[in-house]
Image (spheres, rainbow, N blue to C red):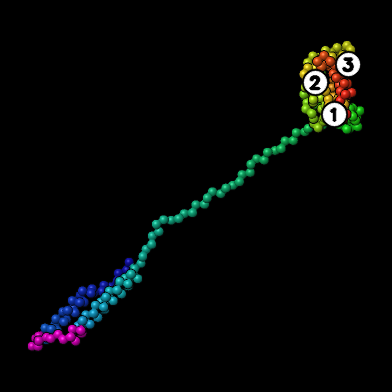
Amino acid sequence: MENYKSTPPISLLLTGFVLLLSACTLKISSLGATPTVTPDLEQTITHAVEMVYAEATETARVAILSATATSTATFTPTSTLTFTPSPTITNTPSNTPTETLTATPVPGKGIPENAIVAYFVIIDSGGPVGCGDSVIPVLTGHYKTGNTEQDLRTALNYLFSAGRYVLGLYNATYTSSLQAMTIDFEAGNGSAVTQLSGSYVPPETKCDAHRYRAQVWTTAYQFDEIKDFTPYVGGALLGDRLYAAMLNAADE
């Protein structure tokens, strides 16, 4: 802050003025005259005092304003704002799963010679089975072991355990819940007598009865060593049961 010239205080000015009046009074007294304060003189003195007071007050005010105007204020910031950028979010692409295509085996195509198959129906194919249908082989996932009894059991159980449709092919045996238990095979004459256990449900239509028989017998005869296949269900021939359905069941 810069310094400014000091101004005489008001009290000093008034003191000087009073001394001046006293000197005048003494001067008059020394001349032998008795001072008389008239109203006009009193008014004059009062006016003079007011003028002196006003001038002194104005001088002091100007001095204060000048000192304020010439002073230099220093501003010191209390804090500094620092901008910290937020972290940038980076999208990291996730690993896109690779689609694995599993080839569905085509029925009747590319079947190895030693594979065990089961036969299912193509409806309305114009074939000789059922009511203008055909049967084609489907892989069971097993291969021939050379044991005819074991291999026949594998093929029949796959057929009877399948659902109504396999790879889009129809299964007329789905109504029954059968399983090949005992198989007596005679290699000399190729006879395979098979005992089926479980519940047998006759087909609902004549066409299904024909399809049922074609599926079971064709599945058994895939083995060249079998010349005569005879399945039983609960002491009765499965062929006889199916023949009864062919006669008595409803038409397709």
Seen in the picture, residue 95 relative to 39 is either above or below; the reply is above
Which portion, as a residue range, is magenta?
Answer: 29-44
The amino acid type found where label 3 is placed reads Asp
- Mark 1 or mark 3, earlier in chain: 1
Residue 213 locus on image (x, y percent):
86, 23
Local packing at callout 2 (Cα closer than 10 Å; few below 14, some 14-19, many 20+) is some
In this view, which residue lies farthest toward the left? 32
Query: Regarding mark 2 in the picture, which secondary structure is present there?
Result: loop
Q: Which residue is mark 2?
A: 200
Please state which of the two labelled residues, at mark 3 or mark 2, is closer to the viewer.
2
Residue at (29, 74) in percent of width and height: 61
Circle number at residue 194: none
Q: Nearer the viewer, residue 85 or 15?
A: 15
Query: Regarding mark 3 in the picture, which secondary structure is present there?
Result: strand
Whether residue 122 can be seen here:
yes
Q: Nearer the viewer, residue 211 or 153?
A: 211
Query: Residue 208's image quarter?
Result: top right
Q: Which residue is mark 3?
A: 228
Circle number at residue 121: 1
Local packing at callout 3 (Cα closer than 10 Å; few below 14, some 14-19, many 20+) is some
